[in-house]
Image (tube, rainbow, N blue to C red):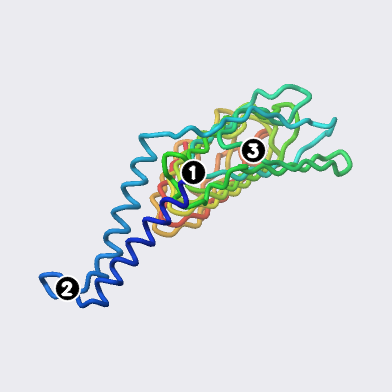
Amino acid sequence: MGRNQFVWGLVLLLIGSLMLANAMGVRLPNGASLMDLFWPIALLGAGAWVLVGVFLRGNVETQNASIDLQAASSVDLKLSHGAGELKIHSGANENEIVHGSFAGGMDHKANRNGDRLEVRMRPAKSAVDFPFFGPYSRLDWDVALNANIPIALDLNLGANKSEIDLRDMNLTALDLDTGASETKLTLPSKGRFKADLDLGAASLEVIVPDGLSARIRASIGAADLKIDESRFPRSGGYYQSPDFDSAANSVDMTIDAGAASIRVR
């Protein structure tokens, strides 16, 4: 029996039992229906399952894989990931765009379009199978990228913990879209590029390496935003390095966030 079948069986038994008790007129001492207990019990069970997933890991198969560069001169890479830990850094060899270890497996598509390679990566094992966040759903990835190839990087991250170190990368653009997550992002130290960061209920720390100038524009809701103004003084509606316009290496960063905690330093 699969774990999903087992858990769904328990859920259905709980719902059926409460509905039967309600139909038979069984009431709590305070006169409330037993069905009133459903959501408190469901939330307590979901919370317990999440905590189990934090401290225990099941036997999820790990795949070691690489994606060939196909002699392309630039890459458009979209990576989707959730329900686990994600590490991204440099280290792929000159004939690869990616290599790494992928818990739960990795599915990808790579299409050559002229001199540009378009790559899409996602977990082979669905991270949204119920009950997500359980001890068998930790899709931990360790991903090495080719630091010598210009890459437009699009990261679509779900509920995970990410350490993204792009310090040595040759990035042409960065698009980060993340939900309920904890992310530490180190930007490339060289180049001129744009970074669009879109966050939900998330924690984000952005490290801007020395020598990289920045302009930072933020549109935030109930977010806690702290930016190192000794490096990026506020100027009207944005924060900007004094030498941003003339700098050889710079990032034009936009941040859209809801209930998030954001640090830029």
Q: Is residue 49 above or below residue 190?
A: below
Q: Are marks 2 and 3 in contact (CB under 8 Å)?
A: no
What is the spatial separation of the Cα atoms under label 2 and label 1, in whole angstroms?
Answer: 39 Å
Q: Which residue is mark 3?
A: 106
Q: Position of residue 199 (x, y in %)?
A: 50, 52
Q: Residues within 10 Å of mark 1 (few under 14, many from 20)?
A: many
Q: What's under tag 1, amino acid-wise? A: Ala
Label 3 packing within 10 angstroms: few (<14), some (14-19), many (20+)? many
Question: 235 above or below 141?
Answer: below
Residue 94 position, x and y percent, is: 76, 23
Q: Which mark is residue 83?
A: 1
Nearer to me, 112 or 45: 45
Label 2 or label 3, whichever comes before in sequence order: 2
- Is 232 displayed left or right of 49 in the figure? right
Residue 208 in view of the camera: no
Amino acid type indicated by mark 3: Met
Residue with the mark numbered 2: 27
